[in-house]
Image (cartoon, grey):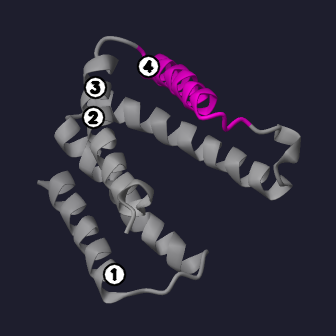
Amino acid sequence: MNLRESWLLFAIGSAFFAALTALFGKLGVAGINSNLATFIRTVVILVVTAGILSLRSEWAKPSGLPWHSWVFLVLSGIATGLSWLCYYRALQLGPVSKVAPIDKLSVAMAIVFGLLVLGEKPSWPVLIGGVLIVAGSLVIALF
């Protein structure tokens, strides 16, 4: 397996940076409007992503992209924005040690969506892992 192209490497990187997002977000949202904090974060993401696209010469003409990609990417962007707005407000109001794990219920929800919408095949490890994520989130939220 080529590690640089491994989905697992990128998934671990995603988890690591999501943990930093929670930590830095909690520190950054203190004393300011959570919606403004989300806006600042979004601008930074735009600049960083544009820089990566430029450095890798990966820009493409928007007109060359398929319409279904546009539809689903716009919907994904809306969902991301709403998720971030909720996340930063939750961080402002609650402890990061509870907010971040509860936010990860998205993993269990993504498993369900993958099974129902995308027709992915369930496996025992995926189902058991999803149940454990839900159970862990409930323990963290309720106790």
Q: Which residue is mark 1?
A: 127
Amino acid tagged 2: Leu
- Disc 3 element: helix
Q: Secondary structure at mark 4?
A: helix
Mark 3 Cα shell of 10 Å, populated few (<14), some (14-19), many (≥20): few
Find residue 20 and name its label: 2
> Is 74 positioned to the left or the right of 116 in the image?
right
| Residue wearing tag 3 | 24
Q: Is residue 100 above or below residue 30?
A: below
Kind of residue sitting beneath label 4: Ala
Quadrant assignment for the N terminus? bottom left
Q: Which residue is the site of mark 4?
A: 37
Q: Secondary structure at mark 1?
A: helix
Horizontal and vertical percent for residue 65? 82, 49
Mark drawn on residue 3: none
Q: Earlier in the sequence, mark 4 or mark 3?
A: 3
Disc 4 residue crowd, few under 14, some 14–19, many 20+, Cα 10 Å: some
